[in-house]
Image (cartoon, coloured by chain):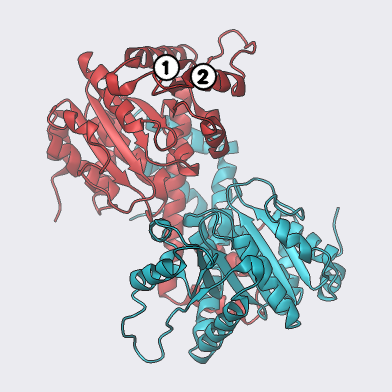
Chain colours: A red, B cyan
């Protein structure tokens, strides 16, 4: 059943949460109207400040996100929250099990909360998240917080969607090493040591400072990622995080970095959509036995996989893949 | 510097480990001679029995792999071992840090051991592993054991490369749930409860039996995955694992499943190579500013990402991506 996209977009702009939810479902589920929705959103998006939050399980990401929502709401901003779980196949408006703290915002009309699962998603995170961000942006959110569940390569991917990346840590041996292993230490624009009332918070901050080489000299005008200590559950230090975020945003605007990042992000988005489209074209070939026939020649030893891929690409693009 | 591929392949066939190692490096590193190597290997491959081993860290994968190598060597088979670490960027002939037990086979000319890292690899695991398996196969290995480090989606991917998938567990609460979460429980053809001398081994086997519904009736001719208990460090139960593997292999041959799996695997391999080639074509566009120009129009709001992807795909294939 086709929905009236212009009306839905208009309702979303007016702040109707169900319209926002509906639009996200449309772009997330690869509906036939996906392209219509994206075309309608394009001129409206580009105003939201997108903040990514990453960190190992247990550092208090959900609590920190909730505290940031409160801080931005106090300042009168409209806030979107996208909680991405790459390991789950369940998406939707329902809150994730562990986001009890987020429920305090559930009745606030100035806050949209959406959980998104991308396991098994065609194109994965890189495909699904930017489109949901675009909906929240076009719907008039001033800030979109993208929180990821779990640690891994996909987190880094999500962080690359943000204007500013916040990396959360908590006191405890090995946490920093874990983060470094997962590759998330390199991506922070702002670092938060949460649960700073626990033993070892200063040590974690020092370790971080050392690992990131924050004490070293930088070229004038370079961004030096700040480390902010918080107790998110009590709201302590959260204003300082917002301040650090706003500083980073101002720095990015001043140095043309914001436009640069957004252009790079759009380029990746286009790339992902294009690759997904091409992958679908190939998948379509499963139906007509062409790929199966090639595969049988490979198992028989009469064709190697590269020559087979050449045939496939040639059939798709009109010229061979080459090398 | 070009290598003499036919000579290298001939040496590998004769069982020269350095030739095998060199060939794997050539296919792994996407060398200019990759295609030449793959073409030379095609008619020689297809004889090895490929066994995948997956399981959470700590279940004794490396020890079990080593014990299986010993068992197959006793039976006079040539064995290849591919230890895949999706989280590491380091590949090569060097053994991984934790594979001390494997070193007992290091001087055996009938065993090839290769560790492979795929983090950041273009096309990832799906791209790199099948090619290394093909080298070991063509070099005359009767059995290729593919062991993965860590748990996750990529493990499932690797398992899908195998003829037979072995899922390892060890006694301990929650292990089964972990495995189920990671999606690896569904993929086993043979299940091994290692460290069976520890408390809880029977409970783990029962839990597994229950979760997999192994007690339920099956259609005649269906494969019922066996659960084998082992103490790999002492070699206990390992012959039973080999027996289970051979039974599964015989069952697959009898029911045409082996040919089916290999054809499906080859199809996926071709698909991955083709998609990688197309992705590279798109990446090439980064250079000529076409993608950047599209991205700037998106951030300006004058173009939506789908329309941009259409333009990109049209330039690549001569016709639009459509929907």
Q: Position of residue A107 (x, y in %)?
A: 12, 30
Q: Nearer the viewer, residue A249 or A295?
A: A249
In the image, is B32 to the left or to the right of A298?
right
Give the residue displayed 20% in from the left and 43% down from the top: A93
User: Considering only vertical position in the picture, is A41 above or below B149?
Assistant: above
| Residue B210 image-quadrant placement | bottom left
Residue at 26%, 33% (x, y): give it: A136
Mark 2 lies on a secondary structure that is: helix
Q: Chain of mark 1?
A: A
At numbered mark 1, what does the secondary structure look like: helix, strand or loop?
strand
Residue B32 in picture, x, y percent from top left: 75, 55
**Discs 2, 1: same chain:** yes
What chain is tagged by disc 2?
A
| Residue A306 appears in the rendering | no
Residue A299 placement, left or right of B22:
left
Look at the image and tell me in which quarter the C terminus of chain B lies: bottom left
Marks 2 and 1 in Cβ contact (< 8 Å): yes
Mark 2 or mark 1, earlier in chain: 2
Tell me if B315 is positioned left or right of B119 in this view: left
The answer to whether one can see residue A279 in this image is yes
C-alpha span from label 2 to label 1: 8 Å
Residue density around tag 2, few if under 14, some if 14–19, many if 20 or more, within 10 Å? many
Residue drawn at x 39%, y 61% as measured from the top left: B180
Between A79 and B279, which is closer to the camera in this rendering? A79
- Horizontal and vertical percent position of residue A84: 34, 41
The correct choice, above or below, for B253 with respect to B171 in the image is below
- Badge 1: residue crowd in 10 Å (few <14, some 14–19, many ≥20): many
Q: Would you say A160 lies left or right of A62 here?
A: right
Q: Which residue is mark 1?
A: A229
Residue bearing mark 2: A205
What is the x, y in percent for residue A160?
46, 34
């Amino acid at each position: 059943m086709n929905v009236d996209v212009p009306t839905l977009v208009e309702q979303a702009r007016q702040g109707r949460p169900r319209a926002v939810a509906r639009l996200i479902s449309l772009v997330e589920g690869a509906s036939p109207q996906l392209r219509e929705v994206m075309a309608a959103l394009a001129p409206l998006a580009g105003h939201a400040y997108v903040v990514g939050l990453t960190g190992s399980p247990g550092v208090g990401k959900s609590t920190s996100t909730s505290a940031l929502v409160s801080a931005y709401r106090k300042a009168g901003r409209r806030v979107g929250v996208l909680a991405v779980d790459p390991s789950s196949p369940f998406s939707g408006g329902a809150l994730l099990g562990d986001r009890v703290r987020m429920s305090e915002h559930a009745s606030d009309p100035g806050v949209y909360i959406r959980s998104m699962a991308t396991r098994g998603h065609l194109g994965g995170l890189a495909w699904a998240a930017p489109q949901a961000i675009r909906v929240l942006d076009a719907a008039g959110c001033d800030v979109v917080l993208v929180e990821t569940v779990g640690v891994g390569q996909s987190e880094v991917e999500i962080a690359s969607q943000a204007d500013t990346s916040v990396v959360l840590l908590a006191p405890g041996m090995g946490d920093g090493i874990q983060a470094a292993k997962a590759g998330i230490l390199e991506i922070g624009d702002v670092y938060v040591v949460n649960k700073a009332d626990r033993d070892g918070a200063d040590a974690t901050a020092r370790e971080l400072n050392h690992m990131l080489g924050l004490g070293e000299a930088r070229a004038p005008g370079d961004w030096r990622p700040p480390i902010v200590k918080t107790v998110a559950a009590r709201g302590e230090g959260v204003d300082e995080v917002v301040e650090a975020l706003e500083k980073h945003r101002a720095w990015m605007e001043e140095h043309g970095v914001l436009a640069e990042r957004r252009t790079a992000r759009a380029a990746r988005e286009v790339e992902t959509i294009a690759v997904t489209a091409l992958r679908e074209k190939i998948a379509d070939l499963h139906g007509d036995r062409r790929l199966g026939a090639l595969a049988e020649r490979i198992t028989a030893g009469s064709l190697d996989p590269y020559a087979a891929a050449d045939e496939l690409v040639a059939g798709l693009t009109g010229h061979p893949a080459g090398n």
